[in-house]
Amino acid sequence: DLIALEPEKSTPKIFVVPDSREGWVKAVELLIDSYFDHGSSAVEFDFSKIRPKGSPIKGFGGIASGSEVLETLLSSIRGILNHLAEARSKMSIVTIVDIMNMIGKCVVAGNVRRTAEIAFGPPQNSEYLNLKNYTKNPQRVEYGWASNNSVYAELGMDYKDICDRIRDNGEPGLAWLGNMQRYGRMGDSPDEKDHRAMGGNPCLEQTLESYELCCLVETFPCNHESKEDFLKTLESAFLYAKIVTLGQTHWPETNQVMTRNRRIGCSMTGIAQFITRRGIDELKDWSEDGYKRIQACDAKYSEKFGVPRSIKTTSIKPSGTVSLLAGATPGMHYPESRYYIRRVRIPYHSDLIGPLRKAGYSIEEAVGQPDTAVVSFPVDAGEGIRTTEEVSMWEQLSLAAFLQRHWADNQVSCTVTFDPETEGDQIQHALQYFQYQLKGISFLPRLPSGAYPQMPYEAITNEEYEKALAQIGDLDFDSDLSKKNSEILMPPDLYCDSCNTK
């Protein structure tokens, strides 16, 4: 139990914050440590080395946010810790997640970064379960969105209290750590290979130990004419990912785990389209044969590179963004509608704005974010595909369990959309059945179209799609645009792509 004590203010230390990511991290570290390394001097910060807002970032790309967002973060954390010190209170779950979420907000505040966080907590702790109950915690509205909050679910537990919260806003998600540790694919016998696992990445498609990072690669089975062609793609995808595991990070603790596990998440996306065109039986066949091919590749390349076999090899990513580039539905999820608007957020200073506007795409100012533009893209998910309104909560859970059994030895990232009125009271019963077949799951109440401004996905009619498409011409990017390191930022998504963890 950590108790915060106010640091000694008579002899403050001055830290000149370097103009680097490492420098910003060090500033946060020094501030937090000053309250828990008892007897420490207070720390003050000099931000003079940080480049001004709007300056180009040549190495990583994008535009600098200036020091203001870091100053705000440090001030907010100091306020939280001062309150704890005055009350001589222990660190609470809310305090820990608050600081974590504030850091996430700081990361994206410059409008050139993304963040993805996941918090894990006990299912019996009401304080944790109410983190996104903004009636009880109104102060968290400003930053609570930065993380997915999940509980460590236990087989046989009472799910009633959790399901009451899920029915309101979809959280918390559930992670069955015991299943992650004991099983590869849930259709195989327990092997206990992942007994050191402590959780997963923010979208929960990867089992992870402490300090471990993701290594993910994505494939598009629906884009292949034959299974043999798909299997060849799997070989190339897996080889690429295996080569990535040969690299090193800046952290010795991470290198130790990564070198031992060589964990890979070879994923499939566009699952809904595949089922529509080829059927569930062929998906089972491709999944089983694909998994066998990947195991053969792992044996071959591990021996060739002189490294251990990968502890796990397959996942189903949520794929909110990557799938769009290939015209695929995201991960295992069904689309909101055959025709829909996909909204993307881009900094107004981005070099992409001009070409997009000239091409006829709808561009408007983001609500509450005057420096951000929202660009609308009309999408056609394809003929014959069912939508989320036509696929019940139970069928979505069954598909997740199917893929966890036949494909994913890590996890299947699945956000189950449900009708709060007709399916909300069934969630508890569904979890009692599927707790033995899944490693993780999250839920999202189905919202009516236009429930809030500029939704990431919004269903439209065929006529609206054709009208929007008719207004769009060819995109003409300048030849030097790729050299300017412009970055697109996506809004908070139904399915996220960032997969970093600590």
Image (tube, rainbow, N blue to C red):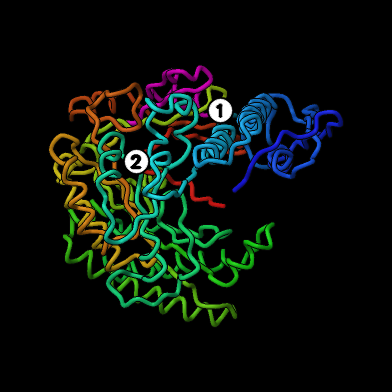
Q: Do we see residue 245 in this rendering?
A: yes
- In the image, which is nearer the foreground, mark 2 or mark 1? 2
Q: Residue visible at 30% across and 30% down?
A: 341
| Local crowd size for mark 1, using a 10 Å CA cut-off: few (<14), some (14–19), many (≥20) | some
The answer to which of 272 and 475 lies nearer the viewer is: 272
Going from the N terminus, do you reach mark 2 or mark 1 first?
2
Report whether 216 appears left or right of 89.
left
Helix, strand or loop under label 2: loop
The answer to which of 496 and 152 lies nearer the viewer is: 152
Disc number placed over residue 364 in the picture, else none: none
| Local crowd size for mark 2, using a 10 Å CA cut-off: few (<14), some (14–19), many (≥20) | many
Q: Is residue 375 magenta?
A: yes
The answer to which of 373 and 361 lies nearer the viewer is: 373
Image location of residue 57, percent across then percent down: 68, 35
Image location of residue 74, percent across then percent down: 67, 30
Residue position marked by numbered label 2 in the rendering? 171
Residue position marked by numbered label 1 in the rendering? 351
The quarter of the displayed image where residue 67 is located: top right
Q: Residue visible at 66% across and 59% down?
A: 249
Hey, what amino acid is under mark 1?
A: Asp
Tell me where the magenta segment starts and ends, as one range: 350-377
Q: Do we see residue 380 in this rendering?
A: no
Q: Is residue 117 magenta?
A: no
